[in-house]
Image (tube, grey):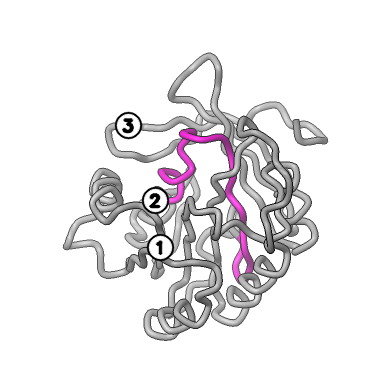
């Protein structure tokens, strides 16, 4: 049964949320932590209790690499009934995605693909937002475009710039939410988790990565600001 509101504080239902940040900051691990919390229903995501739901992960990782990350987070055969994985998908394969959505009916869809062909244009963002609404699910799109990567012109036929500020602008145009994950120069395990857009109140939180089980935990709130640095 659709829960549709399992994490409304951070991840509103029926819409797309974009997660971005610099390379190797832990975006994929944060997405897997979220997947575990939702699929098992017996863990909190950043201190917010989650309701159990089905999770579909689209990943460009090798099956071996993804299996390693899922196992480290705590997935096993005994608790994996609510998770499905789809590998090697591109943004123009919407019909394939719809087939999987019809069969599995996920509450949460995570798209975590490094390939440039998966980067969002405004049109594809709106298409994914419509899917989220039609299937009454939350959708987390993990972008691997970061602040530290070199700026370049528009990717041909996608109309997309390699810049986080463009992601924030795109989320505004599509009425979607955004998450940003950034590292702390003083602590290799500490991250700054910022979120906003789409009716979500802007927040900036201190969180910590726990390498022993690939989870993240909330430390304390950072100082709020009125703008994105």
Mark positioned earlier in the residue sequence (1 or 2): 2
Residue located farthest toward the front when viewing the structure as drawn: 156
Closest to the observer: 126 or 54?
Answer: 126
From what the image shows, is residue 127 above or below residue 41?
below
- Nearer the observer: mark 3 or 1; the answer is 1
> Circle 2 is placed at which residue position?
32
From what the image shows, is residue 16 above or below residue 142?
below
Closest to the observer: 33 or 115?
Answer: 115
The quadrant holding residue 86 is: bottom left
Q: Which mark is residue 24?
A: none
User: Can residue 151 be seen in this snapshot?
Assistant: yes
**Where does the image place residue 138, in percent across and percent down from the top left?**
55, 66
> Circle 3 is placed at which residue position?
211
- Disc tally is 3
Callout 1 touching callout 2 (CB < 8 Å): yes
Element on which disc 3 rests: loop
**Where does the image place residue 46, in percent across and percent down from the top left?**
49, 43
For image coordinates 66% across by 36% down, the residue present is 204
Q: Does residue 27 show up magenta in the picture? A: yes
Q: CA distance from mark 3 to mark 1?
A: 21 Å
Q: Which residues are magenta?
A: 12-32
| Label 1 packing within 10 angstroms: few (<14), some (14-19), many (20+) | many
Residue located farthest toward the right when viewing the structure as drawn: 226
> Circle 1 is placed at which residue position?
57
**Where does the image place residue 73, in percent across and percent down from the top left?**
29, 46
Closest to the observer: 172 or 197?
Answer: 172
From what the image shows, is residue 137 above or below residue 213?
below
């Amino acid at each position: 049964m659709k829960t549709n509101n399992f994490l409304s504080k951070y991840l509103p239902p029926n819409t797309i949320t974009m997660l971005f940040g610099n390379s190797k900051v832990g975006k994929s691990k944060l997405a897997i932590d979220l997947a575990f919390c939702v699929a098992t229903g017996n863990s909190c995501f950043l201190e917010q209790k989650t309701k159990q739901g089905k999770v579909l992960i689209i990943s460009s990782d090798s099956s071996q690499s993804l299996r390693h990350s899922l196992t480290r987070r705590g997935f096993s055969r005994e608790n994996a009934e609510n998770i499905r994985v789809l590998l090697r998908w591109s943004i123009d394969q919407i019909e394939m995605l719809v087939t999987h959505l019809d069969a599995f009916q996920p509450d949460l869809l995570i798209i975590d693909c490094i390939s440039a062909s998966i980067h969002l244009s405004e049109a594809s963002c709106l298409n994914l937002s419509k899917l989220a609404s039609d299937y009454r699910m939350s959708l987390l799109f993990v972008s691997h475009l970061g602040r530290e990567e070199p700026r370049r012109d528009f990717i041909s036929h996608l109309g997309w710039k390699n810049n986080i500020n463009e992601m924030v602008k795109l989320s505004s145009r599509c009425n979607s939410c955004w998450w940003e994950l950034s590292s702390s120069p003083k602590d290799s395990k500490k991250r700054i988790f910022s979120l906003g857009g789409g009716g979500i109140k802007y927040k900036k939180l201190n969180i910590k990565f726990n390498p022993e089980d690939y989870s993240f935990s909330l430390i304390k709130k950072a100082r709020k600001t009125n703008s994105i640095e």
